[in-house]
Amino acid sequence: MRWHQAGRKDAQQMVLFSMHKLPFGWERQITEEGKVFFVDHINHKTTYTDPRLAFAVEESKSLSDLRQRFDSSTTGIQVLHGRDLTGRIAIVTGANCGIGYETARSLAYHGCTVVFACRDLAKGEAAIAQLQKQRPSSSCHALQVDLASLSSVRMFAHTFSVRFDRCDMLVLNAGVFGLPHTLTEDGFETTFQVNHLSHFYLALLLQPLLVRSSPSRVIFVSSESHRYASLVTENISEELLSPSHKSTYTSIIAYCNSKLCNVLMALEMQRRFGEQGINCYAVHPGNVVSSYLSRYWWAYRVLFAVVRPFTKSLQQACATSVYCAASVDISRYGGIYVNNCVPCLPSQASLNSVLANRLWVTSLSMIEHVLGRRAFNMQPLTECNNQSLNDKGKTFSSFTMTNVS
């Protein structure tokens, strides 16, 4: 009887398998003797075990029940092993080098169309050429965006919306660290604008495409440094966020504050846009990862070089971004902070919804101060798929500058 039940279960399992495609890169073949085997064309391996057994989706009832499958040693490529992202479109800012490049490469290797959003277009195209030498079939495009210019961010969003009809993943990866006090062309402190304000603006501009592509995901690359920020509900202001004078500026505090802004906005966007099918995440890539962040001061370059043997590789550092962008495990959950591919508790300040709302309102005001009312006139960016003007008005209703006392 037990044997009969087991046989029936195996038969049901085979029927279930026959209804689902093999993982990306795999092919089912039959020998002359009639035996079924499977070929992994990516890793050039052969097995008699059905690879779908390794990619079963485990349904969790809540976030606390989510089983940990990856850790700090996992790479982005490993996170996506067996996944087919064909038909998906992703944007990765700062994709020409470092963690951004490895994030883009991991997604592109698994069939995703990836847009390299780079300040230097030539470097973005060179990075794509390097990737396509390894994987000629990859679909990658380079578009120019300067995060130190809100006008450039707006132009990027417009160009992207014209060329592509969807956005499944928005990975806000680019950032600066250790800068001396400098102001952008918009008059804002550079670390604040590049790390927070321009990424926040880009996410708002692309919201219609993200909604249309739902379920979609937005990933803010933050840092454990957000725990050392100086922002609190009582002191948040434009001057604190973007110091106008060198005397009130400290580079490491500016960086920590910008990383807190990333976590605050990820959680606030989830509150505002989650019901529209957009899941938002803040991630920590790793501690003192040897990337291009250290390029602005020789002392940081020395520090990063010394600790490099003891920290994550760039492929390991991109794993958490890739996990949040494309993993099936976490698809039901948004508005969370993730470290080493594991959801964890962020700082108490980042959980403060009043602080998040004040940052939202202040950021909108700063953007509008530079670009005027046209900053949020999204009509040119959303004229696709014959949407009605009424639908467009509803799409942007969450941008309202509501304040919470």
Image (cartoon, grey):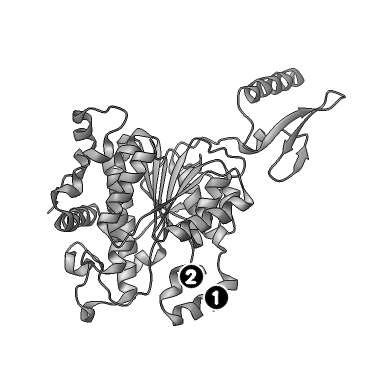
- What residue is at 28 percent from the left and 63 percent from the top? 193
Q: Check disc 1 and report the residue beneath it.
A: 307
- The relative height of residue 319 versus residue 162 in the rendered view (above or below) is below
Residue furthest left as drawn = 405
Amino acid on which the number 2 mark rests in the picture: Val
Label pair 1/2, CB-CB below 8 angstroms: yes
Asked which secondary structure carries label 2, the reply is loop
Amino acid on which the number 1 mark rests in the picture: Val
The N terminus, quarter of image: top right
Give x and y (percent) for residue 160.
36, 44
Task: Work out whether mark 1 precedes mark 2 in sequence or the reverse, and give the earlier one.
Answer: 2
Q: Check disc 2 and report the residue beneath it.
A: 288
Give x and y (percent) for residue 64.
45, 45
The C terminus, quarter of image: bottom left
User: 336 or 269, which is in the foreground?
Assistant: 269
In this rendering, does residue 165 appear at all?
yes
- The relative height of residue 313 versus residue 394 in the rendered view (above or below) is below
In this rendering, does residue 351 appear at all?
no
**Quadrant housing residue 354:** bottom left
**Quadrant housing residue 394:** top left
**Marker count (numbered):** 2
Give x and y (percent) for residue 255.
34, 69
- The relative height of residue 365 versus residue 48 in the rendered view (above or below) is below
